[in-house]
Image (spheres, rainbow, N blue to C red):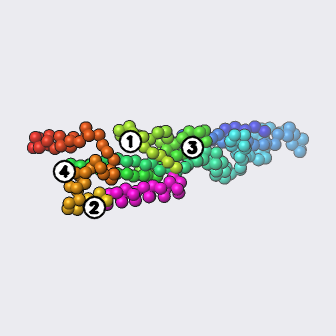
Amino acid sequence: MRDKLFDTWYWQRDDGERVPIQVRLEKEARDDKWKGDGTRNEPPFETLWTRLFVELDGQRIESTDVESLRLAVWAALDKKYEIKWTRYFLVQVDPSRPYHGLGTGFVMSYDDIEKGVTWDGKELLRKWESRGYKVSPWPGAFTDKQGKIQACIVASEKNRRGLEEFVQRIMTLREMLRSFLEPGKLEALLQNLAASTLLPAVDRKLIGLNEGKKGRREKEL
């Protein structure tokens, strides 16, 4: 009983790599040298049966039907090359500047991403973009455009609740700052910033930078 190559299928993994699958055909033919009437058998001999098979890591999958074999092989490959995905939160704090006037601000955001580990230990990043999921190598450490480290934490229920509370605290701080714009409050705060615990202290060398920018703008005009 011999087998020969019948076809080559290609199965695409989630990371985009194509895996070649050899489909082989084996058959058994009647090779009796003599017929019942005493005459000699001559090839081609009568085929008794045929079947297709694929070998995956020592496991043999066989069928007499091509499509049934394909479905069985695909199921085995899905299990073998399945990528284990874990959800993460990518947390960012980005600067935000007003369109008019002088000032500053920030945007705190967190986004759902996924970390995948392949069958051979490779780490992948899966992130939703405008046209669908984009898969790329896992970067290790995440950084912003300025090269500063961004937090990437497991998307556990505890972390999700913590981030929601963090956002609420920022919103509360924003409302508190807004309340100082009431008549009389802002001037009193500005005159006593050194003693205030509302905001952290800053390097005195940074004070006046915005004024310099304003002067340049007025000169250009």
Residue at x 47% of width, y 46% of height: 152
Residue 38 locus on image (x, y percent): 90, 41
Q: Is mark 1 on a helix, strand or loop?
A: loop
Q: Does residue 90 show up magenta in the picture? A: no
Residues tagged 4 and 3 counted as in contact (Cβ below 8 A): no
Q: Mark 1 points at which residue?
A: 144
Residue at x 28% of width, y 47% of height: 194
**Residue mark closest to the camera, 4 vs 1:** 4
Which range of residues does the magenta coloring cover?
Answer: 155-175
Q: Which amino acid does label 1 sit on?
A: Asp
Residues tagged 4 and 1 counted as in contact (Cβ below 8 A): no
Looking at the image, residue 36 sits to the left or right of residue 44; the answer is: right
Residues tagged 4 and 2 counted as in contact (Cβ below 8 A): no
What's the mark number on residue 117?
A: 3
Give the image quarter of residue 13.
top right
Q: Looking at the image, tell me whether mark 4 or mark 2 is earlier in sequence order.
A: 4
Q: Mark 4 points at which residue?
A: 101
Magenta stretch, main secondary structure, is helix
3D distance between C-alphas at marks 4 and 2: 20 Å
Residue 131 locus on image (x, y percent): 41, 51
What's the mark number on residue 88?
A: none
Residues tagged 2 and 3 counted as in contact (Cβ below 8 A): no
Q: Is mark 2 on a helix, strand or loop?
A: helix
Residue at x 39% of width, y 39% of height: 148
Q: Mark 2 points at which residue?
A: 179
